[in-house]
Image (tube, grey):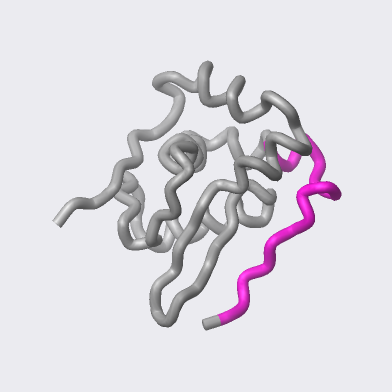
């Protein structure tokens, strides 16, 4: 597996973060991850093809919103909540509280 690149959030512009959050699928992923849990990539139940989901996860990672961890053949993702709150205080709370139906319904696959 390739090594994941995670940007320094201190150098990330607000416009980059807002652009990443502007898509309903990505906003739904952030809302799901906002509970603080780390999720295995394959657990994410999104209304898009796996390749499209992969692209959305890459955009979130590139914007500094998520961190991805590889473990063997599995890939895990979590929200960089503390880093985001330190860089942009109140941003996530504000976006998530007003997102409402603007976010796609992303869930966790259950066996």
Q: Name which residue lies at 51% across and 58% down.
A: 55
| Bounds of the magenta segment | 2-17
Against 77, is 86 above or below?
A: above
Say which of 29 and 81 sits in front.
81
Residue 25 visible to an observer of this rendering = no
- Residues 109 and 53: in front is 109
Residue 90 position within the rendered picture, expressed as x and y whole percent measured from the top left: 68, 24
Residue 64 seen from this side: yes
Residue displayed at 41% across by 62% down: 51
Residue shown at the point (59%, 57%) measured from the top left: 67
For the C terminus, the image quarter is bottom left
- Is 107 left, or right, of 88 in this rendering? left
Q: Is residue 86 left or right of residue 104?
A: right
Magenta run includes residue 6:
yes
Task: Compare residues 26 and 88 and report the one nearer the observer.
Answer: 88
Residue 59 percent across, percent down from the top left: 60, 53
Horizontal arrangement in the rendering, residue 101 relative to residue 10 (left or right): left
Residue 5 highlighted magenta (yes or no):
yes
The residue at the point 49 percent across, 57 percent down is 77
Position of residue 111 in the picture relative to residue 63 (left or right): left
- Where residue 3 appears, as percent x and y from the top left, is 62, 77
Q: Position of residue 78 (x, y in %)?
A: 51, 52
Q: Which of the two residues, 94 or 35, is positioned nearer the viewer here?
A: 35
Q: Does 96 sit above or below residue 43?
A: above
**Quick check: 38 above or below 71?**
above
60 w.r.t. 69: above or below:
above
């Amino acid at each position: 597996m390739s090594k994941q690149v995670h940007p320094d959030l201190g150098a990330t512009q607000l416009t980059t973060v807002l652009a990443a959050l502007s898509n309903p699928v990505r906003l739904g992923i952030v809302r799901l991850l906002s509970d603080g849990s780390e999720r295995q990539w394959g657990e994410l139940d999104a209304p898009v093809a796996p390749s499209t989901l992969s692209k959305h996860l890459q955009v979130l990672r590139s914007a500094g919103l998520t961190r991805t961890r590889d473990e063997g053949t599995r890939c895990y993702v979590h929200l960089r909540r503390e880093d985001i709150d330190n860089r942009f205080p109140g941003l996530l709370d504000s976006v998530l509280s007003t997102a409402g139906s603007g976010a796609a319904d992303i869930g966790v696959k259950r066996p």
